[in-house]
Amino acid sequence: MHRYSNLPASELENLRKLQKLKIEDSPYETLFDSITVSIAEICHCHTALISFLEEDCKWFKSKVGMGNTTHIPLELAFCEQTVLSNHILEIPDATLDERFKHNPLVVGEPFIRFFAGAPISLPLGDPIGSLCVIDHKPNKLNDHQKIALNGFAKVISQALLIRDVHLRTALGVRNGKQT
C-alpha cells in the first residue's frame, strides 16, 4: 500500500503531474544549483534545498549543505507542510514547534533549528515541491528574504515547464502524442 493512498484525489493528481515532468532522480542541473546557492546566501543559511515529494520520500533536485543525502523519508520532511500550506512556512526554532520538536532531524543530525520553505507549484497552483532554507541556529527571514524565496520558487516552477517543453520537443511529442 502506498503512503498516499489516503490523500485526496487532487494530491494524487499532483503526484501524477510531477511524474509526467520526468524530473525524479534526474541529474543535477546548473540552473537549479545556482538557485540553491543564491537563496542560501541571500537568507544567510547553511542549507538550501529544492525538493519534491513522492509517494514515500522527499528527494532533492538540488541542495547546498546536506552532504551526500539525496532522499529522506516523507514522515521526516518539513517540506510536506510547506506543500500542503501553499504559502511560505517559517519555523524560527524547530525545537519549540510542536509539529517538529521530536523530529529526528531536529533532535539529531543535522540538528535543524530554523526552516523556511516556499511551495513550488504548477501553473494552476498545484503544489509539487518546495524551495527551502535550513540552519543550525534559530532565525527569522526579513521581508526581502521572503520575497526572494517566493520569487525563486516561481522561477523553479517556470524552469520545470520550460524543461518539460524541451523534453517533449526532443522526444517529438505534441499534444500528448508521439509525432
Image (cartoon, grey):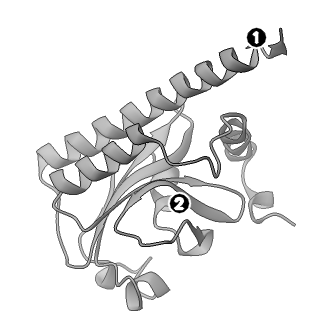
Residue 124 visible somewhere in the drawing: no
Give the number of the disc on residue 151: none
Res. 135 image quadrant: bottom left
Q: Position of residue 110 (x, y in %)?
A: 38, 82
In the rendered view, does 133 fall on the left or right side of 172?
left
Please tell me which residue is depicted at 19% across the width and 76% down the height of the picture.
138
Q: Which of 110 and 146 is in front in this view?
A: 110
C-alpha span from label 2 to label 1: 31 Å
Relative vertical location of residue 77 with respect to residue 147 in this rendering, above or below? below
Disc nearer the start of the sequence (2/1): 2
Relative vertical location of residue 58 with respect to residue 88 in this rendering, above or below? below
Look at the image and tell me in which quarter the N terminus lies. bottom right
**Which residue lies under the disc numbered 2?**
80
In the rendered view, does 30 fall on the left or right side of 21?
left
Circle 1 SS class: loop
Please tell me which residue is depicted at 75% across the width and 65% down the height of the picture.
3
Q: Position of residue 124 (x, y in %)?
A: 55, 26
Q: Where is residue 114 in the image (x, y as percent from the top left)?
A: 27, 71
Looking at the rendered structure, the kind of residue marked 1 is Asn
Circle 2 SS class: helix
In the rendered view, does 171 fall on the left or right side of 70?
right
Give the number of the disc on residue 175: 1
